[in-house]
Amino acid sequence: MKLTRRNFGKGLGALATAIAAPSLLRAQSKGRLVVIGGGAAGATLAKYAARDSKGALEVTLVQENPLYTTCFYSNLYLGGMRSFDSITHGYTKLSQAYGVKLVFDRAVGVDTAAKTVALRDGGKLAYDALAVAPGIDVIYDSIEGYSEAASLVMPHSWKAGQQTQILRKQLEALEDGGLFVMAAPPNPFRCPPGPYERVSLVAHYFKQAKPKSKILILDAKNKHSKQALFQEAWETYYQGMIEWVPEEFGGKVEAVDAGAMTLVAGGEKHKAGVANVIPAQRAGAIAGLAGLADDSGWCPVVPESMASRKVEGVYVIGDACIPGDMPKSAFSANSQAKVAAMAIRHELTGSKKFPPKFRNTCWSTVAAEDAVKVGANYQATEEKIAKTDGFISEVGEDTEIRQQTKMEADGWYAGITNDIFG
Ligand SMILES: Cc1cc2nc3c(=O)[nH]c(=O)nc-3n(C[C@H](O)[C@H](O)[C@H](O)COP(=O)(O)OP(=O)(O)OC[C@H]3O[C@@H](n4cnc5c(N)ncnc54)[C@H](O)[C@@H]3O)c2cc1C
């Protein structure tokens, strides 16, 4: 038999049956799943794989920081609607209730032949299956003059934590009448409606605390998610406060100077009071180091299982993967994690596998009592995770519908963080 990728597993299965011993060995030793990254994707996967395998798998979660601040709802913190604590979560329940082994360290390399993960502290973890969920890295040098050091002055706040706190402090310190400039990123990036929700909630804060302040969005794109809905909200609540400059009118930021607090776009120099520079993005570094990313900087996967198309025995979920029609969102990451958990349990314990289902809804808060949403269902095809049907809020909806949508959004945040960490 020719050993192609398609019949690779079948061949091994036949061999195992013929000599019987490997299946005996499997019964005696637990399959080892290592998950890199404890965000919306990785923490969900670790929890579901551990919980549903009922002790048949040894699940280890490698996560840099013992506390995780969600990017989702971080805009509400920036707008003064939520506390920082309310968007920060720990991992105790994962270990205590489901037996997930926690390793608070950074994965710095993967040997996919030896099936080991190298840790920054010098340790090594062996795995039978590996899931990689590192989220994104921002590409600092995609904007001239931008760097990790510059991001302390002109924060991207596109990874939550210290970056989000820097931006909030700067917004608080801005004088009434000061200018907030956002450099909005090119596609594809984490959370397509995120920049525009952020602008809405910064405007909400300004309206209360510094009503003479203005917002300028310099955008690397010509259109964006929920555009008509955001523009409607800006007209309704924040008239005259927000200017959006698309790429075709010179919106793409080419260079920044953190010392001078200036941004250059379309040949024009803009001086900011607060500058939120969100550059282009790619999968978190470990994905590249493990050979999982392609030339796009993102990781191609088999939609049915979220298995890497590049490295056997490795799964990629969340923002780091190429998600077909799904947006890069926490809801998507959580949905993909459940598909991968089922596929991995099937691979390591022989448990049943069902056709995968993917779902996403992205809510955006645009004012205290007003939120809009977009969502869809998806199925796995050979080629990609493909959208089957979808919905979006309508322009001109009743106040009650919007209040209802805002309540749904808050309910979703409570529900998903409990689903991930609870
Ligand atoms: C402003 C903003 C608003 C958003 N709002 C929403 C929203 O309303 N709804 C929604 O669904 N989504 C929203 N998102 C998107 C959402 O935050 C992301 O899609 C989601 O967090 C992706 O999950 P992830 O697990 O792939 O990555 P992350 O959540 O980033 O998790 C990755 C984790 O892995 C860790 N890590 C990385 N590399 C390593 C390594 N080598 N070793 C160990 N640990 C590592 C990181 O520290 C991090 O904790 C928003 C994003 C932003 C920026």
Image (spheres, rainbow, N blue to C red):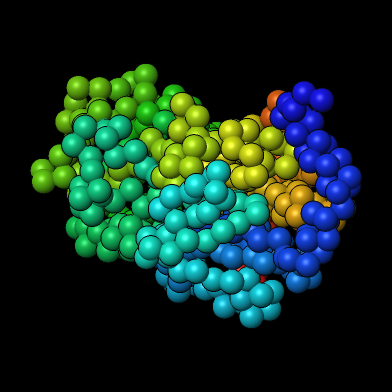
Residue 335 percent location from the top left of the image = 69, 50
Q: Residue furthest top?
A: 248
The answer to whether residue 261 is left or right of residue 365 is left
Given residues 45 and 412, the one toward you in this image is 45
The answer to whether residue 233 is left or right of residue 121 is right
Question: With respect to residue 360, does 255 lie above or below?
Answer: above
Residue 18 percent location from the top left of the image = 89, 45
Q: Residue at x 81, y 64 (%)?
A: 27
Question: With respect to residue 395, does 345 lie above or below?
Answer: below
- Where does the N terminus fall, quadrant-wise? top right
Question: With respect to residue 181, does 94 lie above or below?
Answer: below
Q: Residue furthest front?
A: 19
Given residues 88 and 44, the one toward you in this image is 44
Q: Residue furthest bottom?
A: 96
Q: Residue at x 60, y 56 (%)?
A: 127
Q: Residue at x 65, y 44 (%)?
A: 313
Given residues 208 and 322, the one toward you in this image is 322
Q: Residue at x 28, y 60 (%)?
A: 166
Looking at the image, can residue 415 be seen? no
Quadrant in the picture for residue 33: bottom right
